[in-house]
Image (spheres, rainbow, N blue to C red):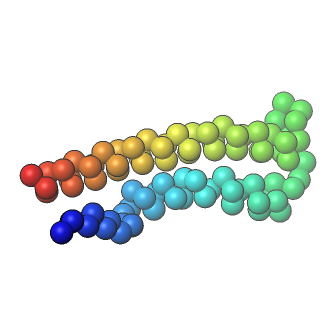
């Protein structure tokens, strides 16, 4: 008889919730147009509508990098945990 592979169900952990929030935040910020649909305050002559969106480009990049690093760390921890349990 062949052994069936172990079925691993998705696990919700606090780290994965943080990863999800990091990836969700830019979408919410950009889809909530009413929060930035104005011209004041200006920044070096640029209306708020434009500089707010450009700021989110940088924030989104940072949050995505953070989410990726957290995901990598979580995967290494899970691999070490499952590797240690099978020995």
* Direction from residue 81 to residue 34 in the image, left or right: right
The percent coordinates of residue 53 (x first, y second) are 78, 44
Residue furthest toward the front? Answer: 1
The residue lying furthest to the top in this view is: 44
Q: Position of residue 30 (x, y in %)?
A: 75, 55
Residue 25 or residue 74, whichever sits in front:
74
Question: For the point 89% across and 33% down, which residue is it?
Answer: 45
Q: How many marks?
A: 0
Q: Please name whichever residue, 70 or 50, is drawn nearer the observer in this view of the structure.
A: 70
The image quadrant where one finds the N terminus is: bottom left
Q: Quadrant of residue 5?
A: bottom left
Q: Residue at x 58, y 53 (%)?
A: 23
Q: Is residue 37 above or below residue 64?
A: below
Left or right: residue 22 compared with residue 38: left
How far across and how far down the image is residue 69, in percent?
43, 41
Direction from residue 5 to residue 26 in the image, left or right: right
Is the residue 52 above or below the residue 1 in the image?
above
Indicate left or right for 2 with 56 as reference. left
- Give the residue displayed 32% in from the left and 65% down from the top: 8
Query: What residue sits 39% from the left and 66% below the top?
Result: 10
Task: Pinpoint residue 57: horizontal percent, then vertical percent.
Answer: 70, 40
């Amino acid at each position: 008889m062949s052994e069936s592979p172990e079925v691993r169900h998705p696990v919700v952990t606090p780290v994965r919730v943080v990863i999800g929030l990091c990836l969700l935040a830019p979408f919410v910020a950009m889809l909530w147009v009413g929060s930035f649909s104005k011209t004041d305050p200006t920044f070096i002559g640029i209306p708020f509508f434009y500089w707010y969106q450009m700021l989110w480009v940088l924030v989104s990049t940072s949050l995505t990098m953070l989410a990726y690093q957290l995901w990598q760390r979580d995967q290494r921890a899970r691999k070490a945990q499952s590797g240690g349990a099978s020995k």
